[in-house]
Image (cartoon, helix red, strand yellow):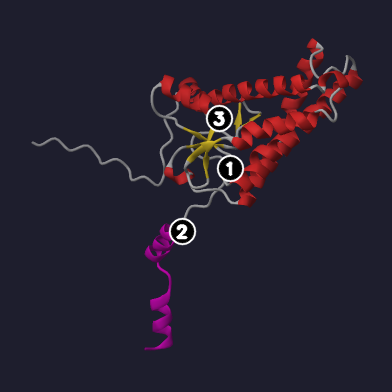
Amino acid sequence: MPIWLQTLRNRPTPARILRSKSRQAPPSNPTGEQDDNPKRILGFIPNFQTKNDDPGNQQPLTVKQKYILELHQTVDFSAHIGNLFQAALQQAANAQPHYGEGWGPYAERFGAAEADQVTSAFFMYGFLPSILHDDPRYFRRAKGSIVSRAYYAATRTAITRKDSGDPTFNIPLVAGFLLQQSISTAYYPPEDRSASRVFENWGTSLAFNSAYNELKEFYPDLIRIAFHRHRHTDPGMPPPPPPASASH
């Protein structure tokens, strides 16, 4: 066979390219926007770890991807804005941590919130999920009754899934918050360093996480209702068949 004819025969055609792409697994992107879940709620609350509980999102994360997720939770600008707001609320109420009032104590409150952010993200999204082979993402149910979805969201504080997909106790989150609160005693004021304070803050963090899960579960629905958007459809799913034409 002539060389030019063999080259033409082996040249990739559009059909071959499509078949090749179809055999490749979709890349996992733990920090990019997928589904109808925004990367930030209300424009600034981090929401990188939320994915719809669909087959396309159930492929386990690698260790590298877990630490990338942890990094985004730590350094994204929205986390710093939240810490500035949190420090302002604590300053206005002269609440814990009890640094006092004034610009100096406000800076200390912000610094403490930043340190809490770093340690909690490290344990909950990077270190513990990696060594325990757990998935640190929140898989949004997105379907079912409001009551069933609300119950599901609240219980994800205590229940997560292994990399294999099996349900398991959420050690990264429960233990991660406890470790973060324990480490905070190194830089909180002396009156906030007691064991009772640690467990009080730990319980409060778990309660807030359950409320945060509710927001992650229902926020896309609220956005869709407010802006009259249609539910997201998977581009990999075939389009619905056209309606049958009426017989004459």
Helix, strand, or loop for circle 3?
Answer: loop
Q: Residue furthest front?
A: 195
Q: Residue 219, image x and y in percent?
A: 52, 25
Q: Is residue 56 magenta?
A: no
Left or right side of 55 for 83: right
Q: Which mark is residue 32?
A: 1
Q: Which mark is residue 158?
A: 3
For image coordinates 43% across by 19% down, the residue present is: 147
Q: Main secondary structure of the magenta part?
A: helix
Does residue 203 appear anywhere in the picture? Answer: yes
Q: Which mark is residue 24?
A: 2
Range shown magenta: 1-23
Q: Type of residue at label 3?
A: Ala
Answer with mark 3 or mark 2, whichever residue precedes in sequence.
2
Q: Residue 172, image x and y in percent?
A: 62, 37
C-alpha separation, residue under disc 1 versus residue under disc 2: 19 Å
Question: Circle 2: is it few (<14), some (14-19), or many (20+) Cα within 10 Å?
Answer: few
For image coordinates 76% across by 30% down, the residue present is: 182
For marks 1 and 3, give the one nearer the viewer.
3
Question: Circle 1: is it few (<14), some (14-19), or many (20+) Cα within 10 Å?
Answer: few
Quarter occupied by residue 90: top right
Q: Is residue 17 magenta?
A: yes
Left or right side of 43 for 221: left
